[in-house]
Amino acid sequence: MMNLHHPSDSLGLLAAQFDWAGYWPTAWLQQTAFGAAALSLLTAMLLFVARRGGAQTTSKPVGILGYACLFFGVAATSLIVTHVITEAVVRMIQLYSAGPVAAAPPVTAILCVLLLACVLGGRASRTNLAPGWFLAISALLALHLSVSYGAPATTLRNPATLVTRDAVPMPWTLWFQLALAVLVTVGAVVQDQVFRRRRAAAWPDRLDLLLTRYLDWPGFSTVEAVLAAGVLVLGVYHVVLADTQAVWPAGVNGLAALAAGLTCLFMAYRRWNGNTAMLGMTLLSLSLVLVAITFAGAFLIDVPATAYARRMPALLNVMLYALWIVVALWLWLGVFWDQQLLNGRGWTTTGKMIPYANSLALYLLLIGVICAFQMTIWTVNPGAPADQSSLGRLIIGGGGIFVLMIPALRIGIAKQNVAFASVACVLVAALFAYLALRWPQPGVRGFLKQYAPVLIGVACLFLLLIAEALDRKATGRAFATPIWFLSLLFLPVLAISSLMTTNRLAESWIQAGTLLPLAVTYTVAGLREHRRSFVVLAAVLLVAAFST
């Protein structure tokens, strides 16, 4: 006689053999989040069954179930966000940790339950809140899985001197960036497909749907913008991270930035938002810079076999040329899109993007200033190679700063824009500093280093005279203000701080030779501008010069 078992016995045996300990949260926070997520799923299932049974959304029981599902879902998400963010922050601080911070399955199960509750609750209540929540919870799940199973943010113990050809796995931050880009892209595609299907269903009985605006799911656009901003922040972080400067990681970084940037521009096209358009253009700029970094890693710099301290100046130099191309592109598009203006106002998406393109060009120039100064002072960093002062490197590096200065100088002169003129003046200062610190002949470098305070003091006087001359000309008035600040504030502070070093000065007259030109500079400025404070400062400097 056959021994037949009840199906419940098999289910009980399967449940007994299943590893519930791995999926059951152990900490009190995870237990509370798991309970709230389970209640949210339960109320979502009841709501779904009630709606399938014909219950109206306006009935009181259905409304109570909907609010209960939302309440428990928000509570569980709030609790689990605390755990996931703490987990990611700890992993970021402990750069060289080899394994995950905590066991992954409990939090993964909670987030999956929340996703299922979000789907069932959205289908049952026919509310537009579900897509935004689904996208946010999916981003939390991607963050948790990346932190738990991805490689550390860097595997380099000493990136300044490391030379290795070992295969380095992609860090968890790069996996998370790629996941965010996929979520942003898929979310925008799904939203557009829903909109297209609604318009296609308008014929022939619902023609009023053709007049409706583009889908505006509450919170969905905000979540997408936050995720795209996360792609941007992680992309910039990976530019300087040692393990992500090789060809494949840089290429993945560029693809993620490109996908997120195009998605943001598509979102701005469908539903105009200046911040979204600016974010999309910034991501596209990052992707173009990463194309240059990928090219440099493939053909110019052998990244795996080159120490971090040796390849960073070369990468910064490549970034200067890439930023020059990107800045020129946005400035050209700002002029080309001028045909999309009607009486000076934009009536199309590209017409509205003109001021954002010009602003982005200025921001990219400021980033170029940072890269230029960082490349300039790299030789004084500990562990920097000694062969960074060759003639070839001097020409290529100085050329990167020079070409980036051209668009700032052109816009400053053509539009009399003080912001672009200020950037051009700072880039000129960076170029002179680069030439002084990287000059091939050691004797010239030593002379410039020893007598730098005197040279800077004399330069302040000449710059003040140049600023006074430019202020009288209509084409150079925009440059007068930044040159004034250089000659009366920044360069004097730099010269005086050079005198206050602990090292002994090369000559005893250097202090007097520095303070005397500064005194003359402030005297001229005080008499020209009728400012008594400048004259008093000049008298103090003059006394200090003669007392030494």
Image (spheres, grey):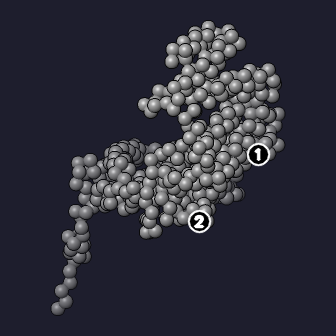
The kind of residue on which mark 1 rests is Trp
Pointer 1 or 2: first along the chain: 2
543 versus 276 height, above or below = above
Count residues near mark 1 (Cα–Cα under 10 Å), then give few for <14, some for 14-19, many for 20+: few
Q: Find numbered disc 2 in the image and state the secondary structure of the residue it sits on.
A: helix
Residue 32 in view (yes/no): no
Q: Where the N terminus falls, by quadrant?
A: bottom left
Where is residue 430? Give x, y as percent: 62, 39
Where is residue 237? Give x, y as percent: 49, 50
Where is residue 285? Give x, y as percent: 63, 50
The answer to which quarter of the image holds residue 479 is top right
323 versus 501 height, above or below = below
Residue at the outermost bottom position: 1
Which numbered disc covers residue 332? 1
Residue 536 in view (yes/no): yes
Q: Nearer the viewer, residue 171 or 276?
A: 171
Q: Nearer the viewer, residue 338 or 525?
A: 525
Where is residue 480? Give x, y as percent: 72, 25
Which numbered disc covers residue 160? none
Q: Nearer the viewer, residue 137 or 364?
A: 364
- Report the residue marked by disc 2: 298
Query: Label 1 vs label 2: CA separation?
Result: 29 Å
Q: Judge from the rendering whether residue 120 lies leftward or rightward of residue 300; answer left or right.
A: left
The kind of residue on which mark 2 rests is Ala
* Residue at point 49%, 64% (across, down): 304
The answer to which quarter of the image holds residue 492 is top right
Q: Find numbered disc 1 in the image and state the secondary structure of the residue it sits on.
A: helix
